[in-house]
């Protein structure tokens, strides 16, 4: 009986020793896991911030390109308007010169040149609206 009780006592002491060693050494792994989770969350949030900043940079670049395109279109439209005005002035001058030189020929030709001018003015207005 004594051998049996001694064996029980040894068994219980070994079990207590094993449990205490597990709690001491194994308890730190939970803390490590929690710290690793926090680190991974912070890394994920920092990568999201970096991704957002990269996206924002790309969007800014595209916005700048869009503005440049719009400015270019406006410049081209202004050039076209100036060219059309110059053409109109030239045509008007050319139409006035023959009309003035041929004014001796008759009043019918003057009326025709004035109708040509009104036609060119209406076409200019149509060009401006577009």
Image (cartoon, grey):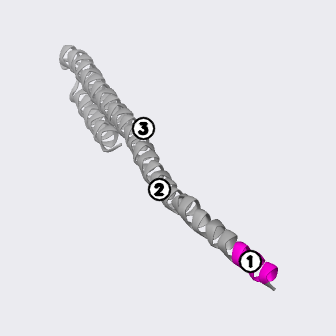
Q: Is residue 14 left or right of residue 62?
A: right
Q: Residue at x 69, y 77 (%)?
A: 12
Answer with the quarter of the image where residue 66 lies. top left
Name the front one of labels 2 and 3: 2
Q: Quadrant location of the C terminus?
A: top left
Name the front one of labels 2 and 1: 1
**Could you tell which of marks 1 and 3 lies nearer the N-terminus?**
1
Q: Residue at x 26, y 32 (%)?
A: 117
- Label 1: which residue? 6
Q: Quadrant location of the N terminus?
A: bottom right
Quote the CA–CA distance across marks 1 and 3.
77 Å
State yes or no: discs 2 and 1 in contact (Cβ < 8 Å). Answer: no
Label 3: which secondary element:
helix
Q: Is residue 18 left or right of residue 88?
A: right
The answer to whether residue 13 is above or below residue 92 is below
The answer to whether residue 25 is above or below residue 99 is below
State yes or no: discs 1 and 3 in contact (Cβ < 8 Å). Answer: no
The x and y percentages for residue 125 are 28, 41
Label 2: which secondary element:
helix
Q: Which residues are drawn in magenta? A: 2-11
**Could you tell which of marks 2 and 3 lies nearer the N-terminus?**
2
- Label 3: which residue? 58
**Few, some or many residues within 10 Å of mark 2 (<14, 14–19, 20+):** few
- Label 2: which residue? 35
Q: Residue at x 32, y 36 (%)?
A: 67
The answer to whether residue 82 is above or below residue 129 is above
**Could you tell which of marks 2 and 1 lies nearer the N-terminus?**
1
The x and y percentages for residue 71 are 30, 32
């Amino acid at each position: 009986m004594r051998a049996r009780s001694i064996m029980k006592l040894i068994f219980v002491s070994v079990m207590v020793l094993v449990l205490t060693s597990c709690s001491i050494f194994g308890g730190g792994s939970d803390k490590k896991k929690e710290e690793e989770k926090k680190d991974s969350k912070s890394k994920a949030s920092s990568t999201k911030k970096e991704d957002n900043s990269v996206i924002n940079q790309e969007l800014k670049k595209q916005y700048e390109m869009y503005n440049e395109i719009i400015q270019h279109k406006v410049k081209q439209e202004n050039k076209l308007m100036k060219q059309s005005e110059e053409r109109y002035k030239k045509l008007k001058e050319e139409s006035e010169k023959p009309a003035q030189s041929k004014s001796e020929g008759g009043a019918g030709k003057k009326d025709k040149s004035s109708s040509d001018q009104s036609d060119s003015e209406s076409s200019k207005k149509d060009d401006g609206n577009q």
